Image (cartoon, helix red, strand yellow):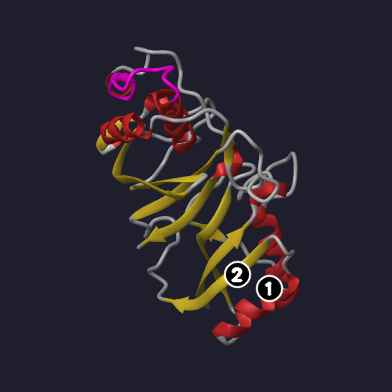
């Protein structure tokens, strides 16, 4: 028995998320079917986390245990032959049995993309959120600093989140871009359901002048101290990488 680590990229537009769901096709389902097509054996894939419906990934990490012995390049090229165009295995390698895609992970980086333009973009519509009015970037950057460190993010999760604790640590938040695109990169130890989308939604409200800069600090201290954060659309979010 060997353990195979995979790094997978996908366009989440047509999927209900990474994990199996009763209401549609998931990325995990497509990947496990491709593995069965390649090996003739049913395998279970374990991922570093989940992405919600419509969310994308460039660096989702997962692993499987198998008795099928194939060269590492055969895992990548073979699986890509059976996968649809919107999912691809970027890398495959055999790892030690102590490696676990979820429990060995030490941090993740997500990127949220905002299209700052009053005119919609046919090319960027799949992976960005169009915000038509100008944003005060200075205020957004100032407010974002309140997220850095270890906090209780109870205010920044949606109903149905099954996490045992709402305390998370944010390592960094950086802003960059190539106008009209604005990138917000969030690095942290882990994230609650819709946490980053609610963080970004709140930052955009601050950038629009609809909330004060102090809103984030208040919500982190007391989840009920202000109206619930705005949840940014799913298509702007992408899992970029996982650290081990």
In the displayed structure, 44 sits above or below 154; it is below
Residue 5 visible to the viewer:
yes
User: Residue at position x 38%, y 26% from top?
Assistant: 154
Circle nearer the N terminus (1, 2): 1
The quadrant the C terminus occupies is bottom left
Mark 1 crowd level (few <14, some 14–19, many ≥20, 10 Å Cα): some
Instruction: Count numbered badges in the picture.
Output: 2
Q: Residue at x 44, y 59 (%)?
A: 241
In this rendering, position of residue 222 left or right of residue 181? left
Label number found at residue 80: 1
Determine which residue is flagged by label 2.
89
- Give the answer, above or below, for where 107 lies relative to 97: above
Mark 1 residue element: helix
Q: Which mark is residue 10?
A: none
Find out whether the residues at labels 1 and 2 contact each other: C-beta distance under 8 Å: yes
On screen, residue 131 versus residue 164, left or right, reads right
Q: Position of residue 96 (x, y in %)?
A: 40, 75
Q: Which residues are magenta?
A: 208-218
Closer-to-camera residue (34/115)? 115
- Image location (x, y in percent) of residue 138: 32, 33
Res. 142 image quadrant:
top left
Q: Residue at x 40, y 24 (%)?
A: 206
Up the image or down, 168 lies above or below 213; here it is below
């Amino acid at each position: 028995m060997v353990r195979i680590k995979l790094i997978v990229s996908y366009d989440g537009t047509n999927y209900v998320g990474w994990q199996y769901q009763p209401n549609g096709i998931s990325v995990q389902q497509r990947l496990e079917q491709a593995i069965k097509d390649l090996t003739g054996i049913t395998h279970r894939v374990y991922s570093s986390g989940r992405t919600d419906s419509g969310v994308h990934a460039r660096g989702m990490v997962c692993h499987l245990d198998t008795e099928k012995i194939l060269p590492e390049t055969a895992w990548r090229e073979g699986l890509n032959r059976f996968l649809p165009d919107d999912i691809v295995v970027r890398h495959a390698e055999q790892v030690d049995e102590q490696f676990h895609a979820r429990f060995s992970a030490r941090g993740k980086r997500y990127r949220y993309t905002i299209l700052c333009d009053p005119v919609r973009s046919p090319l960027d519509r799949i992976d960005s959120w169009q915000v038509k009015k100008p944003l005060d970037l200075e205020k957004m950057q100032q407010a974002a600093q309140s997220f850095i460190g270890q906090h209780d993010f109870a205010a920044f999760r949606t109903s149905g989140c099954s996490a045992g604790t709402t305390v998370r640590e944010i390592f960094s938040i950086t802003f960059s871009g190539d106008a009209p695109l604005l990138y917000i990169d969030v690095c942290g130890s882990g994230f609650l359901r819709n946490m980053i989308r609610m963080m970004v939604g709140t930052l955009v409200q601050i950038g629009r002048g609809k909330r004060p800069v102090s809103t984030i600090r208040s919500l982190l201290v007391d989840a009920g101290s202000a109206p619930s954060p705005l949840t940014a659309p799913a298509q702007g979010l992408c899992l970029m990488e996982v650290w081990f």
